Amino acid sequence: MEQKRPTTADEEMASEKPLKPALQKPPGFRDQENPPSSAPPSGTATLPRRRPRPIHPSSQYPEKKRRCSICRVFCCCVCILVAVILLLLIIAVAVFFLWYSPKLPVVRLASFKISNFNFSEGKSDDGWSFLTADATAMLDFRNPNGKLGYYYGDTDVAVILGEKDFETNLGTTKVKGFVEKPGNRTAVIIPTRVRKRQVDNPTVKRLRAELKSKALLVKVTAKTKVGLAVGSRRIVTVGVSIKCGGVRLQTLDTQMAKCTIKMLKWIKLRS
């Protein structure tokens, strides 16, 4: 019998014999020789990955940040302290005003008298004369407060006669300080004198004529320190300037002249 020779088809069938089944990999198994690819599937855009920020321990923070935080805490504490002090001060002032109801002192120029007023001529045709005068002014101080007193320091007083270009200083004096109790009224007598003060002849004629007609303008200015007195304690001392008058002698014969109190060089108060 003739044996059949194997054909090409038979060889291909023999080569396609079933292989052994592949072993399943256990969970978590990683092939060291063929690591899985982390490349994204085709057709998707590749997003750049942000580099993780290194974490430093607190001991490695910059010194500037520590200083800034300390400065902020200090500034906050100072602001809170100032705010608390201002609040307490406002409350204290409000309580003081509600309890005592402070009022300004009332100052008036009560009277003005000239006892001696003479001019002696100088050299011939030099246009000057010499004034010799004695005057007495009286200031009336009244305290309208029922619970607060006023105390006045030593006062420098000046008396001026005339107006504008004809003003003439009639002398200055110092008055000793005094305390004015609540609801009290005090009369302060201020004597002034001038000896041989040089005055030009036009001013001499003007002053003589106005004195004779009682149209002479009188001004009294004073500089002192005024403070509040609560019982025997003295508080809140402030420098003041008092300006009285600017009125004629004939007006002072019938009524007292009002005075203006100036505080801190810019606050004017009419008493």
Image: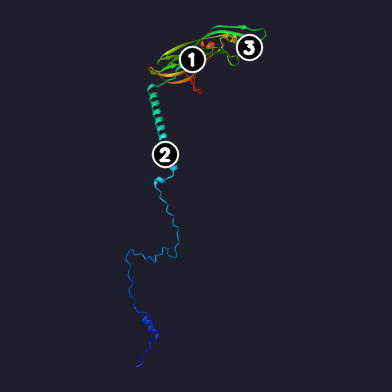
Residue named by callout 2: 70
Q: Is residue 4 above or below residue 124?
A: below
The reply, left or right, for residue 19 in relation to residue 215 is left
Residue on which the image places disc 3: 202
Characterize the local packing of mark 3: few (<14), some (14-19) or many (20 or more) Cα atoms within 10 angstroms.
Answer: few
Q: Which residue is mark 1?
A: 155
Which-is-in-front pick, marks 2 and 3?
2
Which element carries disc 1, helix, strand or loop?
Answer: strand
Callout 3 secondary element: helix
Q: What is the x, y in percent for residue 250? A: 53, 10
Q: CA distance from mark 2 to mark 3?
A: 76 Å
Where is residue 168, by image quadrant?
A: top right
Q: Is residue 64 above or below residue 227?
A: below
**N-terminal label among 2 and 3:** 2
Contact (CB < 8 A) between labels 1 and 3? no
Dot 1 amino acid type:
Thr
Q: Which residue in the rendered view is the most extreme toward the bottom? A: 1
- Name the residue type under label 3: Pro
Residue 39, x across and y down, in percent:
43, 63
Instruction: Give the mark, 1 or 3, whose residue is nearer the N terminus.
Output: 1
Distance, label 2 to label 1, CA atoms, is 53 Å
